[in-house]
Amino acid sequence: MPTVNVFYRNAEQQSQLVALTPKLKEYISKELTCGDITLTSREVSVRLVHVYGEGMLGSVEIEVTAHSFAERVDRQDAICLAIANYMKKQASSLGEVNVWLILSQLGHSEE
């Protein structure tokens, strides 16, 4: 189950990001689908985090953590660019959107 942390600086962006969350979950589930693994939006966890201070690189930064499959590794830059472009297309007023894909081996507690 991929997790997505969306960090944003401007509190006024919150309502826009909340409204985009269902579509973002759907988009990310399609981008991360590979081989025999078909993800649905219900399997993607999105968290919105308001950041205080000026340390961010973009006005919105997205970290996607998912299991490392060869197809994802091969497409990791393309996946990041696709998600960033998708967000800019959905809401150009968000400003600069940076995306990182963190691929790892992981376990989880879900039964």
Image (cartoon, rainbow, N blue to C red):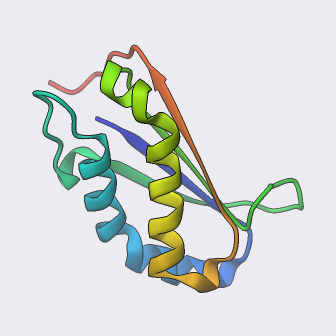
Q: Is residue 22 visible?
A: yes
Left or right placement of residue 73 versus residue 1 in this view: right
In the picture as drawn, the residue positioned furthest to the right comes out as: 54
Question: Where 38 sits versus 10, above or below?
Answer: above
Image quadrant for the N terminus? top left
Residue at 73% from the left image edge and 60% from the top image edge:
51
List x then y, in percent, for residue 28. 34, 52
Q: Is residue 66 visible?
A: no
Image quadrant for the C terminus? top left
List x then y, in percent, for residue 50. 66, 64
Residue at 37% from the left image edge and 30% from the top image edge:
72
Left or right placement of residue 90 versus residue 108 in this view: right
List x then y, in percent, for residue 80. 51, 47
Left or right placement of residue 18 versus residue 50 in this view: left
List x then y, in percent, for residue 74. 41, 27
Q: Between residue 110 and residue 23, name the one nearer to us.
A: 23
Residue at 65% from the left image edge and 85% from the top image edge:
12
